[in-house]
Image (cartoon, rainbow, N blue to C red):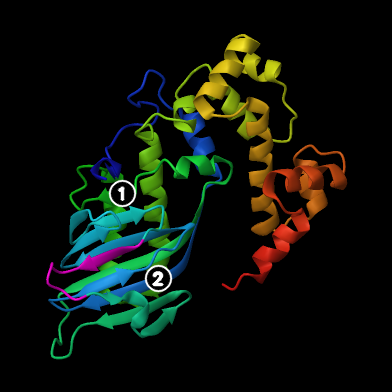
Amino acid sequence: MTERLQGLTETPAGQGTGPFALSSDLISELLTSMRLRGVQYRRVQAGARFGLSFEAQPGRAAFHFVAVGSALLRTEDGSVHELSAGNAVFMPHGQAHQLFSGPDAPLRGMDAFDGVTLGDAVCAVDACQSGEPTPSAIFFNGFMDFDLGGMQGISRLMPDVMLVDATGKRYPGLVPILTSMRHEVRAGRVGFAGVLARLSEVAAAMIVRGWVECGCDNASGLVAALRDPRLARAILALHRRPGHHWTVAELAAECHVSRSVFAERFQATIGMPPLRYATELRMLLAGQWLAEDTLPIESVAQRLGYTSHASFSRAFKRVTGRSPGASRKSVRATPP
């Protein structure tokens, strides 16, 4: 799965590689609804020989930063990547993986280590073997809730592993963030745990932004649509005004093409009719507003252009399979 490994290349916004590069407006729209919230962070120190195994966490993204030493990263498909001090890794799909010192290192589940609480959602783990007073490697890693809102389809196109090296050759804008993280990990100043957690979220967001600015690599599905001038303006309009009940003719007019050309192109590229896409987008946003923003159901319905609570509830259940109230209750009942 080497082709899924995406290195970040410094490319100015709006200068993608396709015939229609992503504009700054489209990039802003893609990133406006992005939510990255850390739910579990660890500062890990390890000896000369270590093997750390991380279980899969579907729906969450994994982030690793190597502050001291080096490590090998092995993913579910068996691919192995070398990491050195200053490297960061973002894994948007949260698949199972391992960090280890060498092929002969025995693996131990990360959850088997006892941690010392450092702050909110941050703990310290000592993975050094007895007799190793000084750690040979220090990492900061975590899992984050990763949600792109109405653009959630984009996340499925992301590579399994997104690497950023310490030299900044591939993405210089991240160098100051990673340098600050390295100082915080090594110095251990008062409040460093909270600072590292926030810096990790910023670094992850910048990695995603860099990937989007580079044209999202493979132009397929939604990405292909965003790079197609016959479709991009319509998608931007849908995301800017989700509460407007669009017609195919209105969307075609946004793109300055005929209704038939627009509908055919949209179906072929996205894989669904434009009005179905608009409905699913509304329900994605509704789920986010109900669960995370805790907006009243009536307010969500009004914001999305529904004239009544009942009509919104019917549409929500038809798309998601559950009522708005049940969706909110299930989220509240989920333990943190």
Which residue does the image show at 34% across and 49% down from the upper left? 160
Q: Quadrant of residue 260?
A: top right
Quadrant the C terminus occupies? bottom right
Q: Secondary structure at mark 1?
A: strand
Q: Which mark is residue 321?
A: none
Which residue does the image show at 38% across and 18% down from the upper left? 19
**Residue 255 visible, this angle:** no
**Horizontal arrangement in the rendering, residue 215 relative to residue 233 (left or right):** left
Which residue does the image show at 40% across and 27% down from the upper left? 14
Residue 158's x, y, as percent? 39, 43
Separation (CA) of disc 2 from disc 1: 19 Å
Q: Nearer the viewer, residue 1 or 146?
A: 1
Q: Main secondary structure of the magenta part?
A: loop
**Residue 4 visible, this angle:** yes
Check the image and name the residue furthest to the bottom. 131
**Horizontal arrangement in the rendering, residue 318 relative to residue 59 (left or right):** right
**Horizontal arrangement in the rendering, residue 319 relative to residue 164 (left or right):** right
Q: Is residue 228 above or below residue 298?
A: above
Which residues are drawn in magenta? 96-106
Task: State which mark lies toward you, 2 or 1.
Answer: 1
Mark 2 surroundings within 10 Å by alpha-carbon count, few (fewer than 14), some (14 through 19), many (20 or more): many
Sequence-first disc among 2 and 1: 2
Q: Which mark is residue 162?
A: 1
306 in magenta: no
Q: Secondary structure at mark 2?
A: strand
Quadrant the N terminus occupies? top left
Looking at numbered disc 1 in the image, what kind of residue is underneath it?
A: Met
Q: Nearer the viewer, residue 55 or 244?
A: 55
In this figure, which residue is indicated by the disc labeled 2?
Answer: 41
